[in-house]
Amino acid sequence: MRYKIITIAVVFACMIASQVFAHDAEIVIEVDDPSDQVEVTVEKTQKETGHDQDAVRLGIVAGSEMSEILFNDHHEFQVEFNEHILPGFYAEVLIGHIGLGTTALARFSKTTSIYPGVDYEWNLSWIGTLDLRYHFFEQSFLDPFVEGGLGCAGSVDLPEYTEDGEYADGGDLEALSIFVQIGGGLAVRLDRFHVGAKVMWRIYNDVPPVTQFQPIDVADFQVALFAGIGI
C-alpha cells in the first residue's frame, strides 16, 4: 500500500509543478501588419525559453534492480544500487508532450566453471522496454515526466568451450519474462544536453503466454540514472 501512495504522490507533485512552472512567454505588440506581430511573438517566446526544440533524444542509462526503495540511510541505498546495476542506452522520439522510446540494459556475469579446461561460466542478463512518457513541459530547463512501459527480461547461459575448442556446456535460455511498469522522474535540460533520474515500479511480471520458460525474478523497483543529448 505504501508504494501505491508514493507513486500517486510523485504523479501529483509533478502535476502541481507543471502548474507552477509552466508558462509560455508571449509578447503582443500592436502593429499595422499582422504578420509582423506574429513574427515578434514567436521570436520572443524562443528567446525566453532559451532552448531549441528536441525531436529525438539519445543517451546512456544505468538502471539498478531493487527490492525496495525506502532505506534507513544513504550508504545502505548506495550498496544496494551498485550491486544490481545494469548499463545500457535509450532512445526517445518527442511529439509535443508525448515521448515514445525504448530502453535496453544488459550485464555479463561470470562464475568459476566446473568443467576441466574452462575457466569461467558466463551469463548474460538483459532488460528491454518500450516506453511511453508524458512530459509536463514541452521544452524547459526542468523536465518532470511520468512513464509507463512494457518490457522483456531474460537470462541466458553463454556457450562454454574448452581450450581445445570443444563444446562443454551452456547456450541455454534460463528464464524469460514480460512485465509492465509505471513510474516517473525528473530531468534537467542544458541546451542540447540533459541528465536525470527516474523510479519505475513493476506491477506485473510473468512468462510469455504459451511458453515453457521459467519467469525471471525481476525486482519490484528499478532506479535509473541517465544522460544524453537532444537532436
Image (tube, grey):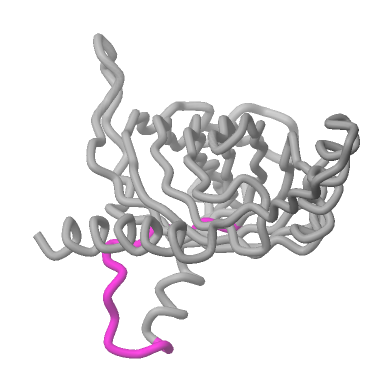
Residue 67 on the magenta span: yes
Q: Which residues are magenta?
A: 62-75
Residue 108 colored magenta? no
x 40%, y 59%: residue: 14
Res. 51 image quadrant:
bottom right
Left/right placement of residue 178 relative to residue 84 reads left
Is residue 62 left or right of 58 when viewed as pictured? Answer: left
In the image, 200 versus 118, the foreground residue is: 200
How far from the left and from the top, in percent, is residue 61? 63, 54
Residue 90 placement: quadrant: top right
Closer to the camera, 10 or 183? 10
Residue at 9 percent across and 59 percent down: it is: 1
Instruction: Report the residue that reaches farthest toward the top.
Output: 210
Who is closer to the viewer here, 200 or 31? 31
Can residue 64 be seen here? The reply is no
Residue occupying the far front of the picture: 32
Residue at 39% over, 30% down: 150
Decide if residue 82 is on the left or right side of residue 44.
left
Where is residue 67 shown, x and y percent of the image?
A: 28, 62
Q: Which image quarter holds the C terminus?
A: top right
Asked if residue 189 shows in the view, the reply is yes
**Left or right of 92: which side holds 178?**
left
